[in-house]
Every structure is written in structure tokens, then in C-alpha cells.
Amino acid sequence: MVRKGNKEFAPALAQVASERGLDKDVLLEAIKEGLKAAAKKKLGEAYADNLLVEINEKTGEPDVYATKEVVAEVTNPALQIMLDEAKELDDSAELGDTLTILVTPEDFGRIAVQTARQVMSQKFREAEKSSVNDEFSTKINTIINAKVQRKEGESYLLDLGRTEALLERRDQVRGERYNPKDEIKVYVVGVDNTARGPKIRVSRTHPNMIRVLFETEVPEIHDKIIEIKAVAREPGSRAKVAVKSNDPEIGAVGTCVGHMGGRIHNIVKALGNEKIDIIEWVDDPMELIASALKPAKINKIRLEENETENGAEKKALVFVDNDQLSLAIGRAGQNVRLASKLTGWNIDIQEEKTSFTENLAKAAAEQQPVESETGKSSLAENLKAAAAEAKAAEAQKNAETAQAGEIQPEEAAAT
């Protein structure tokens, strides 16, 4: 303990606690427990739970006390004291009373201190584990900075400051590779208590990571002015984020992008240059689906809701022109897959078919009427004539079919 001439015990204890990042009271209790174990070993196992250790906060010298019952005849000296002996310590003592008696061993020296040091060391480790657990438990669902130490198999060992964590393969973004001393951002998934201490679970692919990044970079989201309504993400490749403004004076998409794209740039960089599409959330499912499928141009959408054993099944049939089909589906189906997840609708992209007459009429409309020098009909006139003939032929065919009872006359007339 602290000797004469050294600085006072209490300030020294506070300094050690601060250096170890521990609570001073927790550290003091650990020291007392260590000294109690040493005293018990020196005094004998008979002194079980009746020992008490007090430490002089100025000198650091320990005093060991034992609680003993006042009895007429002693059968266990560690736990009992004769009435006449008790009277010498406290003249008001009576049979059945409990006295606290100073029992500090005279040679409470090297062995006791060594034993206390070992026990305290164990208590330090336990207190450190508890402190780390408490610190990182408050960081669950947040993003922290980590430094790569080395690769271990398919995982990376990360330095989190006071402890370490493994970034396992399933939590890594596909294609990302790290070198020692690289600094990366990770999402704290949870803290598990194990025999070896708290295990911090971290991830770079967790669905909430992109939400937290937006909350960090966009103060309006933190302040609830803008809401993140939905997120769909394929880590390392692309993500879609639907946002909504609660203030008509503030645009949700522009605010998230930031001045000259500064805000979204920081988010993209933290995610390893993952592409992010930000869309405006609307309550109309058709409008939302159309926005989620951008940059593809949508012709029309048909919604279907069916009750199944697993609940309501929401399906959206989306029709696009042929030249928009691959754009709407996306590479390897990514665009439609992310849009489905974002909107909550199972989206099926289909090419919109057009009739021969519609194609002819469209082609004719796109041509400017130009008469040739020979006076012959222009291409536009020929196309219009062909379209008219085809339409008349279709009408005639429908009329004949109607007479045969295959379709209603009203339908034939409408055609």
C-alpha cells in the first residue's frame, strides 16, 4: 500500500482509475476484495464472510475487521468472542450482541500483499471487461471508426481503441480488401458476453448502416424534418433510399444530396463508393413504383393484391417499351429487385405489346409529308394509306366474327 512520504492514497487511486478508464469506486472495491482474500488466507478459512477491510484514504494502510458474536462459551473463535473480552472492547456489550473487532494480522506483509496483487489483477480484468461492455453497449446501432490490424483467415481483426473486433466474411462488402492500418467505418450490431470478455459484433453490410450514415451526414434527418421511409441495399453495389420531408419548404432529395453533392459524397465514400439512388417517398404506390424504377420510363402499372396463407401478396405489373425493358430490369435484375424491396411490391416488368396498325400509324405520324418531284405519293402517305387499309380490314374481320357469335357486336363496333 502507499507508504509515508508518497502522495495520498485517494488521489493516487483516482489517477490509476483514470489511466485504466475505470470507475474509482469499482477499483477501490477490487482492492478491498483482494486484501480480504489475503487476510482470510492468513487468518484461516474459519474467517469466512465475517471479514471487513477498510483502507485509510490518506495513507492507504488497510485495517482488517471481523464481526463476532458475544457468547458465554466460545466454540468458534473466528466467529465468537467471550462476554468478558467483549466488555473490554465495549463495556455495553451483552450476550448475543455482534461486535466488529480489529484482527489485522501482525505480519500482514509480503504474502498478503502478493496475494492481494493477484486478486486485484483479476478484479482489474473483470472491471475492464465490464467497462468495455458498458461502453460498447451504448454504441449498438451506431457507426464507429476502426483500424485494420491484420487478416485472420477470411476475417479482419479490427482495433476499436479499448478492445478488438472481428469483421467476419459475412459482414464484409463483397470485393473490399483491407490492409493493416486502413481506417474504416463499421456498424455496431451488438455485444455478446463471453468467458473471454465482451465480443463486439460489427458489420459493413447491415441494413441499418446506410440509415445511420444518412442520420449522421444529414442533420435534418436527425431532427426529424426529413424521414427515411425505406431502404433497399445490395452492399458494395447499389442502394435505393426513399425519403420524405415533413416541411413543405424543404426538399427531401436535394437536402440529402447536399450542396454540390457534398453530403451524399461522404456517405458513398464511407460505403466504399457504393452507388445510391435517392427518391422522393409518395403514398401513391403507382407513383412510388415508377420513381423507384428510374431511370426507366414507365408506360403503365397494374396493381394486384391477393390473400395467401402468408398474408396479403402485393404484385405490380409494370409495362414498358422494348427499349426500356433492360433499363427497368437492370443488370442481373438489380434495379427491379431493389425497387421491389423498397416499395414492398413484387414488381414484374413486361414489355408492352403494340398492334401492327398502331405501329404503322406511329411510323406515319413520325414522318413529315413530302411530295416527290415525280408527283408520286410520299413515304408518309403510303404509310398512312397502309394503316387505313389495315384498320379497315380489322374492322371487317371483327364484324364477321361478331356475326358468327364469337364477340359481341358492341365490341366489334368499338373496334
Image (cartoon, rainbow, N blue to C red):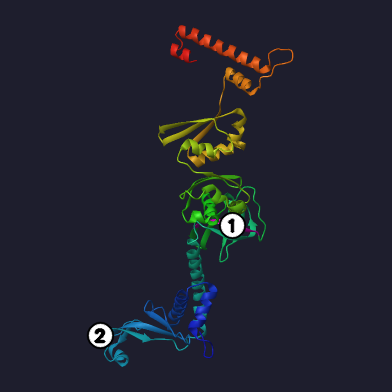
In this rendering, which labeled residue sits more in front, label 2 or label 1? 1
Q: Is 328 situated left or right of 52 in this image?
A: right
Q: Which residue is mark 2?
A: 95
Task: Report the residue at 55% width, 49% height from top.
Answer: 254
Q: Residues within 10 Å of mark 2 (few under 14, many from 20)?
A: few
The image position of residue 383, as x and y in percent, is 64, 16
Q: Is residue 250 left or right of residue 90?
A: right
Q: Name the residue that disc number 1 marks.
A: 185
Q: Say left or right for 363 vs 68.
A: right
Question: Which one is nearer the viewer's eye here, 303 or 98?
Answer: 303
Confirm or deny contact between disc 2 and disc 1 (CB under 8 A): no
Instruction: State the separation of the CA atoms marked 2 and 1.
Output: 68 Å
Residue 224 magenta-highlighted = no
**Judging from the image, what secondary structure is the residue with disc 2 in?**
loop
Residue 268, how many percent across, how many down? 61, 51
Name the residue type under label 1: Lys
Q: Secondary structure at mark 1?
A: strand
Q: Which mark is residue 296?
A: none
- Amino acid residing under circle 2: Leu
Can residue 222 be seen in this snapshot? Answer: yes
For the record, the magenta segment spans: 182-190
Q: Is residue 191 above or below residue 377?
A: below
Q: Is residue 205 visible?
A: no
Q: Main secondary structure of the magenta part?
A: strand
Point out the tag, 2 or 1, that comes first from the N-terminus: 2
Give residue 310's position: percent from left, percent from top: 41, 36
